[in-house]
Structures are given as structure tokens and as C-alpha cells.
Image (cartoon, rainbow, N blue to C red):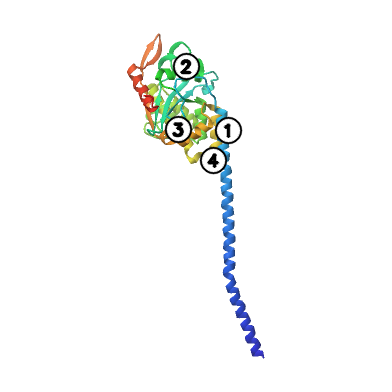
Amino acid sequence: MTVYKDCQEKGERMSQSRSEMRENPRKKKRKKGKGLKIFLIIILVLFIALGLFVWKIYSDVAGTTEKIHKDVETEEVRESSIDISKKDPFSILMLGVDTGDLGRTEQGRSDTMMVMTVNPTTNKATMVSIPRDTRTEIIGHGTTDKVNHAYAFGGTAMSVNTVQSMLDIPIDYYVEVNMKGLQDIVDAVGGVQVTSPLTFTYEGYNFTEGESTSLDGKTALAYSRMRYDDPNGDYGRQERQRQVIQATLEKVASLSTISNYQNILGSLENNMQTNLEFNDMVKIFNNYRSAAGNIEQVQLEAEGTTIDGIYYGIVSDQEMSRVSGLLKEQLELN
């Protein structure tokens, strides 16, 4: 009986052991299933957090755009309005004004004037720098003067009307940034990198030809302002200004600034105005970003002269026709 009992107990233990072995895979599967659920929950939470972050950025950008938006009354020179939803070529006047620089609070003048045309068909943008001393008719003021005085006489609207008349093209949009704003925006993006085309010292900052230099806001302002020690005068300064603007745009567009986007938006709110609405910006980003990344830089050439003791830049009819023709071609107006 004892032997029989022992055999029976051994059999029960073996049977229990086999039963446990059969159950283990199911336990492992349940553990794996539980682990997968936890993983999916974590991924879902991350996606929700990312969605909220993206929505926050979207909302903040829309709010900033609303604050900096300002329509201006300008002369309508197009026969029909453009439709950027249909990828029509468009033009934009960029004004860098000296209001806010060196403590100025008055209207100021347009220290920098650039016209950009963007054409998604040719996949190209053309940027024309207009010398600030260019002598032209100031539309709405009844005088012939330096083109940058248009802003002092009548603000953005007079600047747009004057440039439209001078280049014989429509200006669809404008972006205006004051000189103090340049400093704030460069600081907000964490500085920019440029290579100086010449060696010079300005306002205590040193720059060396061919040497890549990291610029913070104050240094960028000094780098882009110097004119009289540049052998190319205002043309040289405009080249350096284009460098800073392009480097800043590239930095803003990079993912490296995403964590600092609120500072960037804050600097724009305080220093920028435009007639572009948020929806316009979204459409331009979606439909024109490839063309906007392919920029051809063009310089409007002027010959310096003095009239009644005042220095002006005189643009020949041939030169004006050349530049106007380039812009018209890109705007498909020919």
C-alpha cells in the first residue's frame, strides 16, 4: 500500500508539473499582451502630447500673425488680383527701417529696400536690392528725391507706391522690420553664421575677410550697418544685409529653433508689420517654398552724383529697363 501510495503521489506531481508547463506559454502570452498594451498607451500619450504641442505652435503663430498684420492703402496697378491658391507668381517689398535703432522713435527712413518676386513655375525667386540713395519720383508727395525718403514722407504705403512706379511692377505684399528688430530676431534664433566679404571694424566689432563668424544681435546689426569703409559703398552693405537676412531665414526654418519659437514670435510681434495674413503664409509655405529656397540676387546699379550739394544714385534708363524686365518676366507680365 505504501509503495502504491508513493507511486500515486509521484504521478500526481508529474501530472501537475505537466499541467503547469502547459499553462506557462499562456502566462507568457498574457504578459506579452499586457506589455504591448502599455507600449501602445505610451505611444498614444506621446502622440497626443505632440499634437497638443503642434496645435499650441499653430495657435501661437496664428496669434502673432494677427498682431503684426496691417493693411495699407496703395495704388492698385494689377488688372486682376492674384490667387496664391492657384500658385500665381507674386511680389513682396521688404523694408528695413531705421525707426527703433539707436533710440530713434520718429518715423525714420527705409534703410533697406528689397523687392522679391516668387514664381513656382520657374521654381525661382528673384531678389532685387534697391540702393537707398536712388533718385526717383516720390509718388503721393509730388517731389523727386531719394527713394528711402518715401517712408519718411508717407510710411509703407508711399514706399510701395513709389517702388511700383519706379520699377513698373505691382507690389502684392510687404514686410517691414525695424533695425532694432533685426537685433532682437537674430538673438531669438540663437545667432547666425556668416562669412565676411571684407576685413573691417565697426562699433568695436572686428570682421575678417573670408572668415566664418558667429553673430549675435548686436554684432549682426553692426555687420549689416557699416557703409562708408566698404569699397563698394551701399552695394557692399546691401550684400551683407542679404547675408544676415538669408542666414536668419534659414535658422528660423530649421528644427533647431523649435524649442525657442515663442521668443522668435515675441521678437516679430514687437518689430514687424506685414499685410500677409496667416492663411496667406500657410499657402505660400505649401505652394512656394521650393521656389523661395532658390533665390537669384540682383543689384539695381546706380551711378553716384551730387545735385545741389546732395548725393544721389542715378539709375540709367537701360538699367531700370533691365531690372524691371527681369521682374516682369518672373511675374509673367510680359
Report the residue marked by disc 3. Answer: 86
76 and 109: which is toward the camera: 76
Disc marking residue 259: 4
Tell me the crowding category of disc 3: few under 14, some 14 to 19, or many 20 or more residues within 10 angstroms, Cα based. few
Which residue, as the protein is rendered here, is positioned at the far bottom?
A: 1
| Mark closer to the observer (2, 4) | 2
Which residue, as the protein is rendered here, is positioned at the far front?
A: 80
- Tell me the distance, in whole angstroms, between the alpha carbons under discs 2 and 3: 33 Å
Tell me the crowding category of disc 4: few under 14, some 14 to 19, or many 20 or more residues within 10 angstroms, Cα based. few
Dot 4 falls on a residue whose secondary structure is helix
Report the residue marked by disc 1. Answer: 63
- Tell me the distance, in whole angstroms, between the alpha carbons under discs 1 and 2: 30 Å
Residue drawn 54% across the image and 22% down it: 103
Residue drawn 42% across the image and 17% down it: 165
Q: Position of residue 290 (x, y in %)?
A: 42, 36
Disc nearer the start of the sequence (4/1): 1
Which amino acid lies under the numbered mark 4 shown in the image of this protein?
Ser
| Mark closer to the observer (1, 2) | 1
Report the residue marked by disc 2. Answer: 150
Dot 3 falls on a residue whose secondary structure is helix
Q: Is residue 325 visible?
A: yes
Tell me the crowding category of disc 2: few under 14, some 14 to 19, or many 20 or more residues within 10 angstroms, Cα based. many
- Tell me the distance, in whole angstroms, between the alpha carbons under discs 3 and 4: 33 Å
Which amino acid lies under the numbered mark 2 shown in the image of this protein?
Ala
Q: In the drawing, does residue 215 fall left or right of residue 2?
A: left
Dot 2 falls on a residue whose secondary structure is helix
Q: Is residue 198 visible?
A: no
Q: Are marks 2 and 4 in contact (CB under 8 Å)?
A: no
Disc nearer the start of the sequence (1/2): 1
